[in-house]
Image: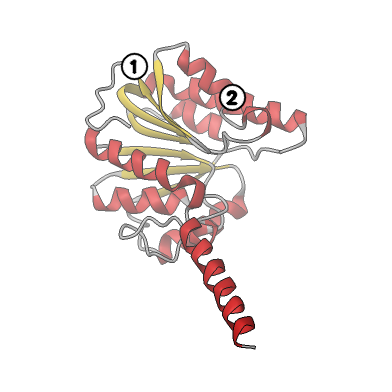
Amino acid sequence: MDILLYVVALGVVAFFTGKFIKHKSLYPFMPFKYDFRKRRDTFLKTMELMEQINAKVIIETGTSREGLKGAKSNGAATIVFGKWAKEHGAVLHSVDINSESIANSSAEVERQGLQDTVTLHHSDSLDFLKDFAQPVDMLYLDSYDYSSHDVEIQRKSQEHHLEEFKRIADQLHENTIVLIDDCDLPNGGKGKLVIAYMLEHGWKIVMESYQVLLVRNNFALEKAV
């Protein structure tokens, strides 16, 4: 009986140790309980680079419809970058075509006290980006939901993200940072076309995992990865 209890105890310890190792928080920037898993490292590097260039204007396409509850599933980037913006005197513009997503994101923005820093735009991202007239310091592309199996949706999502980049390209300066979500998915994910286009037009990859982080070729990395 003692041996059985010992084996069970070891199993419990191993289980929770595994859960702890997989847990990737942004603590102390965000509470430890939030697990950003596959996006944690690219989020950290993006914020490091934003601080390096003293970023003031951030654009996100595709708002965080689940707020911080979606930290592990969709990244909760509206709140993450909104909090960073609040602490660094910057602003975040988050655009989404879905009214329900905007409403849910707005509720979380208010809960986190970010309403003076984060502006939510209910619009087609392509129209919004075409009309945006300010220089952009960080661009986060995460709109048009992808599919792991529907090739037509994959194509449309990839084409949409490429068009987003082209619509805002004139507002991207020599130190602009671009982060693209959901890239490590079947058939190249959301970033397949836009990343190829960027690499052909003077950009380079800084980090490549589930997300891909890019800067221009002449961007001087103070702490290269």
Q: Quadrant of the N terminus?
A: bottom right
Question: On the image, which quarter does residue 70 sit in?
Answer: bottom right
| Secondary element type, mark 1 | loop
Residue 148 appears at what percent x and percent y? 71, 38
Residue 141 horizontal side relative to residue 159, left or right: left
Kindly identify the residue that appears in the image at 25 percent across and 53 percent down. Answer: 87
Kindly identify the residue that appears in the image at 43 percent across and 20 percent down. Answer: 169
Colour pattern of the rendering: secondary structure
Residue 206 appears at what percent x and percent y? 38, 28
Question: Residue flagged by tag 1: what amino acid is it?
Answer: Asn
Residue 199 horizontal side relative to residue 4, left or right: left
Quick one: label 2 or label 1, which is nearer the N terminus? Answer: 2
Residue 131 appears at what percent x and percent y? 45, 28
Front in this rendered view, residue 91 or 158: 158
Mark 1 burial class by Cα count in 10 Å: few <14, some 14-19, many 20+: some
> What residue is pinned by disc 2?
192
Front in this rendered view, residue 72 or 97: 72
Mark 2 burial class by Cα count in 10 Å: few <14, some 14-19, many 20+: many
Against 98, residue 207 (above or below) is: above
> What residue is pinned by disc 1?
217
Q: Quadrant of the C terminus?
A: top left
Kindly identify the residue that appears in the image at 34 percent across and 59 percent down. Answer: 27
